[in-house]
Image (cartoon, helix red, strand yellow):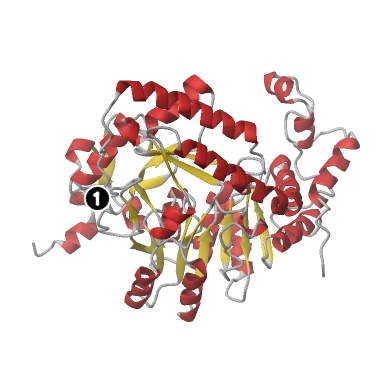
């Protein structure tokens, strides 16, 4: 049955509630009309919409009304059988997917360049990661797609794995052969799940890479707030096929989801689905054309280079999201971190992230030509500034180190701990994740052995001014206290 995507059932019900002007003797405490600096700045209507699930607005943990109807429309738009609204971001979706499929000590095959939320899911579920090294791009200094043969080998070596986890696309827009990977996983009776945080717009233009549901994946977590237009922290989990136990999945989501979800976030998901459904097929090709024009202009700027779809396909990638713009800046003799800061501080242009050699801009149907002109003009000025200085091209080391795993993340997380200075941590077993944000990919995770290469990579990021996320501060890192750990004693009893 064809569905009416002009409808926004949840948002409409919230509007109707607000217009009835109820006297509020329930939570939240602002009662919809409290005066403060925030309400003065954003307007009181946002506060009047922020109510706590009164009659008629359904229940996110067990939807039977307007949330159920809105989720059915969402599933249909994304070519899925079922959709779940999430108010804890795609992190909640990834936690829910892995925790609903993998029990303690069960294996899951995945690339090492996963988001930190995947590591959290491994700790909470107790699953054992079988890491695959992604294809490395030494020219740009980034990790790209997974090779199909590497996945085939991992499945051969670990036929008892429960699932294969796929990033579609990477933070930088690169895609693996998702259809072949999904088919391979299903041939071996494994679940295929995807982190589609940066690919939520894929279903709405044939000029974009294949979406996970179109490829036959069983589950996917999608950040609608990143590329579709909902409010930050709002995401969805979509699923299809007979391999998914939806009772267990719903139970897992309810363990992680707030019982007081934001109506603003839920409404934004409802409206964003309608917008991308009708406007995406028209506007996304326009965005792709604008991005191509911007790449052409940037490539003509001295000292700068761009990476496009042909570049990544020549490296073996299946596809590339052309709504992203990667600019290599290191030939100017400066890092992407330098350019990021200068764009922000001097030109009021914010890009998504920086790496040693590059910056990344993420476009959407909200991007305008004026936005891209501002980026191009700012890059011209930066080029002119540093061309005069005639700095030698940056030859920064790129090693994308993959540490050896001593134990599963859950074991290290619960093991006895001690704190040591970073420069004294070589050969210790990490008991925390240390990562650069963005993109939030850990340099080291609990259970991995810290090496000199890892410390060298980390020092490079620190000197660049990057945000380092970890549990510990003051130049220390949390590691397993081997002297108090029964597992270490058992493994080395005969040394």
Find residue 460 and report its horizontal and vertical position in percent.
Answer: 28, 35
Find residue 294 and report its horizontal and vertical position in percent.
Answer: 54, 39
Residue at 41% of width from left, 27% of height from top?
383
| Residue 361 in view here | no
Find residue 168 and report its horizontal and vertical position in percent.
Answer: 51, 58
Residue that mark 1 sits on: 429
Relative vertical location of residue 427 with respect to residue 103 in this rendering, above or below: above
226 displayed left or right of 386: right
Residue at 24% of width from left, 50% of height from top?
429
Extreme front residue here? 300
Find residue 390 and report its horizontal and vertical position in percent.
Answer: 29, 25
Relative vertical location of residue 450 with respect to residue 243 in this rendering, above or below: above
Relative vertical location of residue 204 with respect to residue 22 in this rendering, above or below: below
Q: Nearer the viewer, residue 207 or 193?
A: 207
Label 1 Cα crowd, 10 Å radius (few <14 / some 14-19 / many 20+) = many
72 displayed left or right of 349: right
Q: Quadrant of the C terminus?
A: bottom left
- Tell me where residue 474 sits by quadrant: top left
159 displayed left or right of 184: left
Q: Nearer the viewer, residue 384 or 35?
A: 384
351 displayed left or right of 476: right
Relative vertical location of residue 355 with respect to residue 377 in this rendering, above or below: below
| Residue 270 in view here | yes
Q: Quadrant of the N terminus?
A: bottom right
């Amino acid at each position: 049955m064809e569905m009416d995507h002009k409808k926004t059932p949840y948002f409409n019900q919230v509007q109707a509630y607000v217009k009835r002007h109820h006297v509020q003797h329930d939570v939240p405490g602002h009662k919809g009309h409290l005066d403060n600096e925030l309400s003065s700045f954003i307007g009181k209507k946002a506060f009047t919409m922020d109510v706590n699930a009164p009659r008629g607005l359904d229940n996110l943990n067990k939807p039977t009304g307007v949330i159920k109807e809105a989720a059915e429309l969402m599933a249909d738009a994304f070519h899925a059988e079922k959709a779940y609204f999430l108010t804890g971001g795609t992190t909640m979706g990834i936690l829910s997917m892995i925790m609903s499929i993998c029990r303690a000590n069960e294996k899951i095959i995945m690339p090492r360049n996963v988001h930190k939320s995947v590591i959290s899911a491994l700790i909470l579920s107790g699953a054992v990661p079988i890491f695959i090294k992604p294809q490395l791009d030494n020219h740009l200094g980034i990790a790209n797609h997974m090779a199909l043969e590497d996945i085939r080998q991992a499945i051969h070596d670990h036929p008892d794995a429960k699932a294969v986890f796929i990033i579609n696309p990477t933070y930088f827009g690169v895609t693996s052969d998702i259809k072949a990977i999904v088919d391979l996983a299903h041939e071996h009776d494994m679940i295929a799940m995807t982190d589609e945080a940066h690919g939520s717009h894929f279903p709405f233009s044939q000029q974009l890479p294949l979406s996970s549901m179109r490829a036959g994946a069983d589950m996917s977590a999608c950040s609608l707030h990143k590329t579709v237009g909902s409010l930050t922290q709002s995401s969805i989990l979509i699923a299809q096929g007979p391999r998914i136990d939806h009772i267990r999945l719903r139970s897992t989501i309810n363990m992680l989801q707030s019982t007081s979800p934001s109506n603003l976030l839920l409404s934004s998901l409802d409206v964003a689905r309608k917008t991308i459904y009708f406007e995406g097929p028209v506007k996304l090709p326009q965005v792709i054309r604008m991005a191509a024009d911007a790449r052409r202009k940037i490539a003509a700027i001295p000292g700068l280079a761009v990476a496009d779809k042909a570049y990544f396909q020549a490296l073996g990638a299946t596809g590339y999201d052309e709504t992203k713009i990667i600019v290599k800046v290191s030939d100017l003799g400066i890092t992407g971190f330098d350019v990021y800061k200068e764009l922000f501080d001097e030109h009021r242009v914010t890009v998504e992230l920086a790496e040693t050699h590059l910056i990344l801009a993420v476009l959407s149907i909200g991007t305008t030509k004026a936005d891209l002109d501002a980026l191009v003009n700012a890059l011209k000025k930066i080029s002119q500034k540093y061309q005069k200085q005639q700095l030698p091209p940056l030859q920064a080391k790129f090693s994308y180190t993959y540490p050896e795993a001593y134990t599963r993340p859950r074991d290290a997380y619960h093991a006895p701990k001690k704190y040591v200075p970073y420069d004294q941590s070589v050969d210790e077993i990490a008991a925390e994740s240390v990562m650069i944000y963005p993109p939030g990919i850990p340099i080291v995770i609990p259970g991995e052995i810290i090496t000199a290469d890892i410390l060298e990579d980390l020092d490079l990021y620190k000197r660049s001014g990057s945000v380092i996320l970890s549990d510990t501060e003051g130049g220390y890192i949390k590691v397993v206290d081997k002297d108090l750990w029964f597992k270490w004693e058992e493994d080395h009893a005969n040394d």
